[in-house]
Image (tube, rainbow, N blue to C red):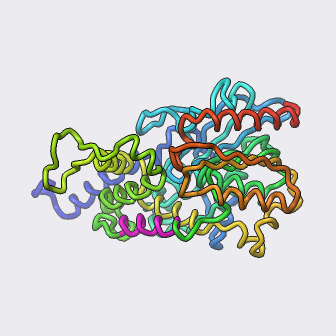
Amino acid sequence: MDSTLTPDAETALREDARRAGYEASPASDPRSPVMRFSNDEPLAMDSGARLGPFQIAYQTAGTLNADRSNAVLICHALTGDQYFAQPHPVTAKPGWWETLVGPGKPVDTNRYFVVCSNVIGSCMGSTGPASLDPATDRPYGLDFPLVTVRDMVRAQAMLLDRLGVPDLFLCIGGSMGGMQVLQWASLFPDRVFAAMPIATGARHSAQNIAFHEVGRQAIMADPAWEEGRYLEAGTRPSKGLGVARMGAHITYLSEPALHRKFGRRLQNRAAPTFSFNADFQIESYLRHQGLSFVERFDANAYLYLTRAMDYFDLAEDHGGVLANAFRGSKTRFCVMSFTSDWLFPTADSRAIVHALNAVAAPVAFVEVESDKGHDAFLLEEPAMFSAAKGFIDAAARARGL
């Protein structure tokens, strides 16, 4: 900063720089369509807050048919976004579910109209803690109301209403996306013909809450977090967010996958350095994951979305009985788990299946043999693709598509 400037001029320049950085961020410039809702149509949230105005960033693929019966809603996971089959505007990487969604794939964009929105509380264009609060013209930070999975689903329903989609042929998602699928089937049973929750649970376990709390504390312990006001301060809690991502990423993998991919191999060296450098390949990999993550994600959004997952407990919302969440449902379900997923183990999926059986809901269950851990639903898994295609094709025949 030029020392000849007055304090007021320095402050103005810092504010201009901060605003320029904000205006170029994915939170304010999502590079995707955005649906805006005014103060007159607020989102009623579980916290009691009424969020308005707000916006939802989204992407679509395929064409809605004449009777509006072929819509598919894809629900993204914790750090996912609306770019399910489009290059990411920040990383330039392919869409995160291009393995499953696209022409001729299980979710066939030649047959279905596919919608995916960035969830409320995230940072890729939907309103969240990185968005500007219209009441103050400052980023919300921790003034943003706490978000639940049910809030995410209510916002998605408002988006679909605007898009002219009365109901869904299919609602599909993994992990936090699977939680949204279950919430959709429970909250709007008449709007969901078929549901496919993958690698998920009807509630977050104590172990999962514990992992999330470690990540949140890493972020809030970073001096650059500035009590959540880092965007105004022109800083980023990159170290804390990077550590949170490193810890979380371990839970997405499995020990066999880690051993196969890295083992105890050293990183670009023949012997240990006897230091705290990244001697092992797995250390280098995790550090890379942390660094690349902070380039595309907002730290406060990470706090909010992990908290939303922690609060999710579908049974508790229905008198402590999970089956009550689906009573009377005509939705067709396919519940899928992976043998090596210890974040959402198969037992979690079986609990969902048992609840659906208890109310005579039509349900199929698939446990995919895989050593890739929780992230298997995002990877090349032929058994998953085959099961998904079989379920979706059968549902399409029943729907008359």
Residue 38 visible to the viewer:
no
Residue lying at 52% horizontally and 44% vertically, measured from the top left? 371
Give the left or right position of residue 95, taking residue 196 as reference. left
Which residue, as the protein is rendered here, is positioned at the far bottom? 319
Give the left or right position of residue 78, taking residue 224 as reference. right
> Which quadrant holds the C terminus?
top right
Give the left or right position of residue 358, taking residue 142 as reference. right
Is most of the magenta stretch helix, strand or loop?
helix
Within the image, what quadrant is residue 101 found in?
top right
> Could you say where residue 76 lies in the image, as x and y percent from the top left?
59, 47
Foreground pick, 165 / 307: 307
> Which quadrant holds the N terminus?
bottom left
The boundaries of the magenta stretch are 208-220
Residue lying at 60% horizontally and 58% vertically, measured from the top left? 53
Residue 148 visible to the viewer:
yes
Foreground pick, 89 / 392: 392
Residue lying at 52% horizontally and 58% vertically, measured from the top left? 128
Q: Is residue 205 above or below residue 38?
A: below
